[in-house]
Image (cartoon, rainbow, N blue to C red):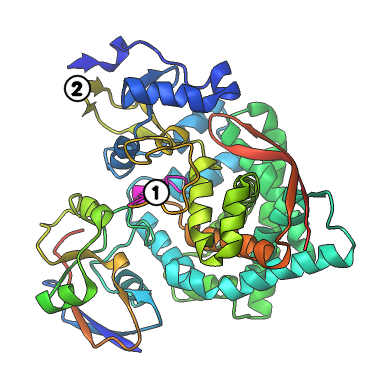
Amino acid sequence: MSTITYISNNDSPREVRTDVGMSVMEAAIAHNIPGIIGECGGACACATCHIYLSSEAFEKYGSPNVFEKDMLEFATAEARSTSRLGCQVKVHPDDPPLTVTIPDSQ
Amino acid sequence: MIAFSELPILNLRGKEFRENPNELHDRALSTGRIHRGKHGAEVVSYKLAQELMRDKRLRTNQVSFMNDMGIQGTLTYEFRCRMLVGQGFTQDRTTIRQVFVRHLGPSRAEEMRQTIRVICNDILDGLVAEGKTRGIEFYDDLAVLIPSRLYCHWVGAPKEDAPFVARISDQVLRVFTRDTSFMPSIESGYHELFDYIDAQIADARRNPQDNLLGALIAETDKDVWTEGHLRDFAAMILEASTDNTANQIAMVAAMVLSRPHVWEAVKADPELVPAAVKESIRLHSRSVRATRETLEPIEVDGISIPAGTPVSMVIWAAHRDPTVFPNPDEFDLHRERAPNIQTYGGGVFSCLGQFVAEIEMEEMLRALVERFPNTQMETLETEHDPFVSRVATMKVNLLP
């Protein structure tokens, strides 16, 4: 088990434990975290699970591939240098705790 | 700016489509990204189709095509209007999709892999026990049993219900042919389907089980969604997960078995199974088109398209778009930077069962490779309409 903390401007921080190989999007939906929608189900096809990582986390989980970058252009909120789609960030049980920031809109 | 109505009509659904779709689509791709067809806009470019499938100025045209069929007031019409593809961009729709993500999302689907593996092997064991390994009808004897048995597992039904599940799915999904002559059969199919679902839900409430239906009932009990949602979407899973997946399972096997070099490569390295599945779907997708309609006027490539125009994403053309898939006729197990296939649609109307469906295809192919490495396909006939493709006959010898 690892933990993900979700931070947003609209709610207090929420920490959840994640199962093996669960994405940041799936963990959010499983725990009813507001602000992450995941409309396409995790297929990198809708940009409604946009998140911001810290620089350190971005380095650990890597840059988005070309298709994810393309999809991030359609995100409602501003895409930043550490933007990722939550469905493409898989958290493994031995990963250190991860903190993600949810944009104001999806 | 050119008005859409001024474009010449290019018929992508006529005789040539039936007889030689690849040449037709290649020609369409070489002359433009979007064309005016007899039934609205026809998008052939992969990238444009991807853009429009996630553009919220378009929605699915489910209700429009049923209105055109004149089937208002039927159970079929009312049910399909309540489905996700019948709805607009509502909160209700998002709530429903999130329930599906929780129970059928990528990691949950992966957890089902072992169950699917057992089902595939059990079906093969049954064929061996019956001495029925030569000249099997791949669709009826194998492919359709995988999703229908999985559905039985999900709702706690005996595996003997699988033929019923398969028959009902095939019967009701004929609505997508837009052929009204099927309507009496489709309507009676939905009545049977709902009787079956009501019985399964009642049984699951009497004898709670740790399965998908139990999880969906728990969502109902927590007021995440309603009793009506539970009934509708337990039915929707049956209709959507069986016939579509079974046909695609058979087409994946056909694409691989018809290319000895691919079959040999997958046998030599079963790690190539997922790539073989993706490439097979690209070459022969169950879905031929994904359909939308414009909610407001839009402009595409200097063409102004009015509100209310049907827009079809021609998946069969997009999967041959050489700007995205170089050498599109080639079955390439090592395609670099290959984007998502469009079989499952795109954007917020993407198929939520896609993760489970691909695992079913992978496990079927893996079981064949491991247990019947000398399998041969004797015959293959497929048929297609403008919306879906299906296996007409596919005879296979399962050889160890």
A21, above or below B246, in the image: below
Residue type at mark 1?
Answer: Phe
Q: Are marks 1 and 2 on the same chain?
A: yes
Chain ID of residue with mark 2? B
Closer to the camera in the image, B61 or B106:
B106
Residue visible at 52% across and 32% down in the picture: B66
Residue visible at 57% across and 61% down in the picture: B362
In the drawing, what numbered circle is on residue B349? 1
**Where does the image place residue B113, in percent across and percent down from the top left?**
56, 72
Closer to the camera in the image, A36 or B229:
A36
Density class for disc 1 (Cα within 10 Å; few <14, some 14-19, many ≥20) is many
Residue type at mark 2?
Answer: Gly
Density class for disc 2 (Cα within 10 Å; few <14, some 14-19, many ≥20) is few
**Where does the image place residue A80, in percent across and percent down from the top left?**
9, 61
Q: Is residue B269 visible?
A: yes
The quadrant where residue A48 appears: bottom left
In the drawing, what numbered circle is on residue B265? none
Task: State the extent of the magenta-drawn residues as a range.
Answer: B337-348
B118, above or below B364, in the image: below
The quadrant where residue B58 appears: top left
Residue visible at 56% across and 27% down in the picture: B70
Left or right, B114 with reference to B331: right
Circle 2 sits on which residue?
A: B302
Quadrant where the N terminus of chain A is found in the figure: bottom left
A55, above or below B278, in the image: below
Cα–Cα span, label 1 and label 2: 26 Å
Q: Residue furthest right?
A: B131
Closer to the camera in the image, B40 or B369:
B369
